[in-house]
Image: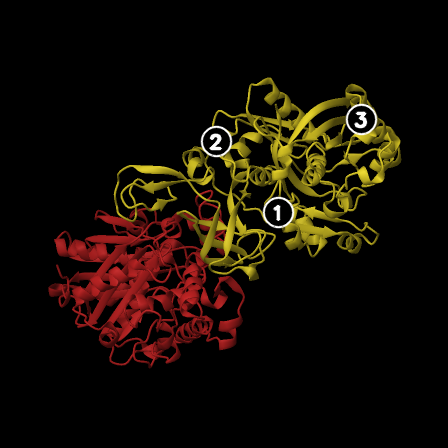
Chain colours: A red, B yellow
Amino acid sequence: MTFKDKIAIIGAGCTKFGENFNMSYGDMVFEAAKEAFEDAGVEGKDIDAAWLGTAFPDAGVYKGRSGMDLAEPLGLFDIPITRVSNYCATGGDAFRNGCNSLLSGESDLVLALGAEKLRDRTPQDSIVRMMVDTGHPIYQKGFTAAGTFAVVGTRYMHVYGDITEQLAKISVKNHYHGSLNPKAHYQKPITMEQGLKSPMVAYPVNLMGSCPTTDGSAAVVLTRAEDAKKYTDDYVLLKGYSLSISTGWDLPFYDPDYDFLGYRATQVAGQNAYKQAGIQDPFKELDLAEMHDCFNVVEFITYEDLGLCEKGKASELIDNEVTTLGGELPVNVSGGLLSCGHPVGATGVRMLYELTKQLQGKADKRQVENARLGLAHNIGGPGAVASITILGAK
Amino acid sequence: MAGIISYGVYLPNYQMSGDVLQKAWGRPAGKGTKVVSNHDEDSLTMAVAASLVCLKDLGVGIIDGLYFSSTTAPYAEKMNASVIATALDLNRDAFTMDIGSSLRSGSNGLKVAFDTISSGSKTNIVTVASDSRMAEPGSYLEPFLGDGAVAFLIGKGNPIADIIDYHSVYDGLPDVWRKQDDQFLRHDDVRYSRTEHYGRNMMNAIEGLFEDGNYCAEDFSKAVIFSPDGRSHFTVAKNLGFQQEQVQDTLMLRTGLIGSAHGLMMLATALDEAKPDDLILFANYGDGADAFAIRATKFIEDNEEGSLPEVEKERRSIGSYTKYLTFRNLVGNFELETPFTSIPLLRREEDLNIRLHGKKCNECGKVMTLALKVCPHCRSAKEFMDIRLSKRGKIVTYSQEHYYPTPEPPVTMAVIDLDGGGRILAQMTDTDASEVKVDMLVDLTFRRLHTGGGFVNYSWKCKAARGGGSK
């Protein structure tokens, strides 16, 4: 079944991403939803179903464990609200569920919102603690999140040769893009020297190649495409989406068949989404992409997983600046996770916010020229779950 | 007849020379080098390592007892030997026992194992001594103490040496001691100890042995006499009529005194060189003394390997005294804060994570190393065959973690393909981060992971395989 052109995003909102010390989880939910409602020209009371994406309530203030934590800050009572959790694909999955509700006819106007409040704790006490202290007493002890992805970089370099410089170039590119985004956590460009020589976090991933610990929330308002005009003339259309889980939390490191050269979750979700959207040659047809650069090596490998280049050739895209703003296929013009930060549940929805603004031509200094078709990608767990959403201009 | 079937010495991978101590404390600390265990080692993990060396290719199925001797067992209450037996994957009905408190506990274990076998109640017992004793930083004892473990397999069959006589004396007054609430060792007047604690007890035990068996010094090819300081044993040997060339090297300058395992290590090096029918005197000290007459059999000729580990050549110097203090948890804090653990979980997964049993899919033949009900390769949910995993493998890929709490960053996390099938993920230890490479050969080594739940959570890490890194 294809969902192409059946769903419209009619409004999008996003808080400033950063260390939002003066905002609670509920404050951020309120701000993101308010912007999305105003953009769509609707009010909270018009929403008849909602999905809340929060991945790690326990890494924050225990908010986001259920739909209640969306209902309360918005006064959104007496409708179905479901909390979604699917690691870094959480935001994308909240959106997917919202689409499905509309397509099934369960609802007519849906809010999909992601929020994560991580900085009421120190960074060491939030995401880092999850890996270091609260996981399985034996498995993965010694890993941080960076390391779970770094192993792909190490293996890739063993097979295809050194990519240290290309990884640094990704960091430089995304921090440059972040300097153009007033909602990014970091808005300062970095030098190639910083990209190469910042302190190592988990070899081969260094500090400038790692996303920070960040608070944020983002929201989109959806309706069936045929109803979009009732609310606004300026909407974008869903072209395809897919969510795929290809392994478990520990299995990638214990599976003798895994080659550590890419993520099947991304590959499968990408192919499914392309099929729905009718995309034959993604590199030629896509105008921009938001990719899951939680660590620079993940963006690198995603070029190959999404079929934008041949296996082993991602370096060429970077060296030729194809994925920089102004290039043939700009990637992470928002600044990506490296600049925006990664409030986990919010990130996927933040990407949809970015694509919506880009496809509407409202992205200001970071606007991609003639943006007609954009892709958002998240990969979560240790490369286990991927969400792909493709949006197109009206 | 019961006797020594094999033995194995484990010495940790770090050493600290007198220079480092001299620099730290501004006074001479001797010419010796002390072996220092890594921050993730304790007497229990070292005992596992020594036992693995001792057992070599012998299947663990024949072992029906394990005795663990130490003055520094990690648990005061809760048996330590049972953890070692689990890591060694011994049969569940093996008889396990801790022998504690005394520096002499190593030779106590040898005696008790010998008696157990002789009685016929058991057939093969590993008796392993291990210690990581702590002197107060800056104290007289500090330069003398090293860490290590030695295991002996006592059994019937074809022993390389028979224990033919034994004599023991005890002494209730304290020479070297540590009360329940003491962190560091205390000791009596050193000069008094040389003659009145050490000298008197050793003489009494050995003279008793001579009397029992009607021996004299000339009967022995080697006198293995424990020494608290690397020299007092010469006086004992001389008083008994031994010539200097009969006296076995104490190894003090090479390793430091490795506690309850030290005498056994000296015995191991004497057996390395022994020939059939050689008679060896072995005398061990601590709260009295144990003396043994041990005779090598014709099977000693098959005993080829030198027992002092090859790793001695590759051993790494601990560069600074501060690092030593962090290893012993005396400065800095590198413990995980509140690591989660669960005893029900650890029990469910013990076969997999501690005993290292994998599951082989009957459908596709792939080896699984996680507790799964469905094979991730062929998706069959049929029966799986239990197999014992290898402790050697090759690195597939790795990361190096600079933000994981450890006194020795970065922590290398290695994905390893085990020989014979199965893939695991393990922390790397005892290996310089700069040496790590894809395809490097590694051996699994039993280590402390953390102390979540208030107990020690042990599991397997990996280290560069002995005798060379990459294949």
Task: Give the residue type that dot 2 points to.
Answer: Gly
Residue B132 drawn at (x, y percent): 67, 40
Q: Nearer the viewer, residue B277 or A355?
A: B277
Q: Does residue B326 appear to the left or right of A233 in the view shown?
A: right
Residue B229, placed above or below residue A330: above
Q: Does residue B428 appear to the left or right of B168 in the view shown?
A: left
Q: Residues within 10 Å of mark 2 (few under 14, many from 20)?
A: few
Q: Point out the tag, 2 or 1, that comes first from the N-terminus.
A: 1
Quarter holding the N terminus of chain A is: bottom left
Q: Which residue is mark 2?
A: B61
Q: Are marks 2 and 1 in contact (CB under 8 Å)?
A: no
Residue B73 drawn at (x, y percent): 63, 34
Q: Which is in the foreground here, disc 2 or disc 1?
A: 2
Q: Which residue is mark 1?
A: B39
Q: Nearer the viewer, residue B178 or A242?
A: B178
Q: Point out the tag, 3 or 1, that comes first from the N-terminus.
A: 1
